[in-house]
Image (tube, helix red, strand yellow):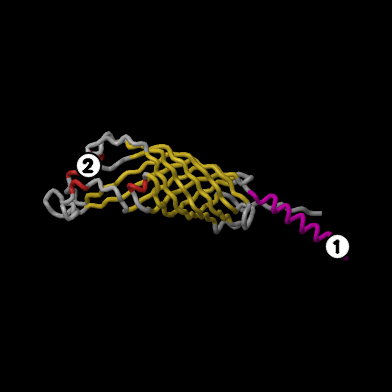
Amino acid sequence: MKQLLWSYLLLFTSTFMAQSADSIIAAPLVGIHFGGDIPAADLAERFGPNLNAGACFIYKTKKNYLIGADFNYMFGRNIKEDVLSQLRTSDGFLIDNSGYPADIRISERVLNFNLIGGKILPWLSANPNSGLMVTGGVGYMQHYIHFVDAQKQIAAINGNVVKGLDRFTHGMSLSEFIGYIYLSDNRLLNFYAGVESYQGFTKSIRKMNYDTGMPDTKSRLDVAFGFRFGWILPLYSRAPKTYFYN
């Protein structure tokens, strides 16, 4: 009887170890994410806090290395640089072509694309495919001030004229992320969350800013810090299991 119990214990231990060893899988991961960012450096002189939405495609290897790409769209209404100051009245109102208060919406637009690489580290991990997620990336950033003239009654921001006011800026960027990723064994609950940062090395592509009458040739450092929460769709079957039989 004792020998039989030891045999069952050995079988259980071998099965558990085999499952654990083989449960780290390679898989493509598709995700969408949401968050918010706080600008810093030169970007903070133009924009305030914003919201962030985007998507990613990442391939996870059997050693939990990550490689892929992500896209981020940042937007908000916190515009600090008043490029329409020359059009305002002494009371701070904007007047349309007919002399009435203008119906205009001004917002921030930031687009960011990165090629990323990183790793899942087995810290506080619920299973071998989950844990501390660390990534870094290199890519492209562009940002500008977006105008919506609902009634098309402000000549100064319609047509090509707006290009002298939108502060369209672009350049190379770097990104970093650190957080936690959870991939469930049954594929029903898969998410990640953490903090992120961006650094854009940018310049204006406009020859002149119409509101100042001066060219904009400054090299910029556009920085943002924020948080991100994302849902993941793993494109794989259940983690493989290996069984041993005596």
Report whether 104 appears left or right of 70. left
Crowd around label 1: few <14 · some 14–19 · many ≥20 (10 Å): few
Residue sitting nearer the eye, 115 or 197: 197
Asked whether, in this view, residue 172 is left or right of residue 84, the answer is: right
Q: Position of residue 24 (x, y in %)?
A: 64, 49
* Element under disc 1: helix
Badge 2 element? loop
Nearer to the camera, 100 or 225? 225
Crowdedness near tag 2: few (<14), some (14–19) or many (≥20) residues, C-alpha within 10 Å: some
Residue 50 point in image, percent of width and height: 37, 53
- Find residue 156 and report its image quarter: top left
Residue at the (63%, 48%) spot, across then down:
25
- Bounds of the magenta span? 1-24
Quarter holding the N terminus? bottom right
Residue 211: mark in rendering: 2
Q: Main secondary structure of the magenta part?
A: helix
Q: CA distance from mark 1 to mark 2?
A: 88 Å
**Amino acid marked by disc 1:** Leu
Identify which amino acid the numbered label 2 is placed on.
Answer: Asp
Image position, residue 97 (x, y; %): 13, 48
Q: Quadrant of the C terminus?
A: bottom right
Q: Which mark is residue 4?
A: 1
Above or below, comparing residue 223 to residue 9 in the picture: above
Residue 220 relative to residue 196: left or right: left
Magenta stretch contains residue 89: no
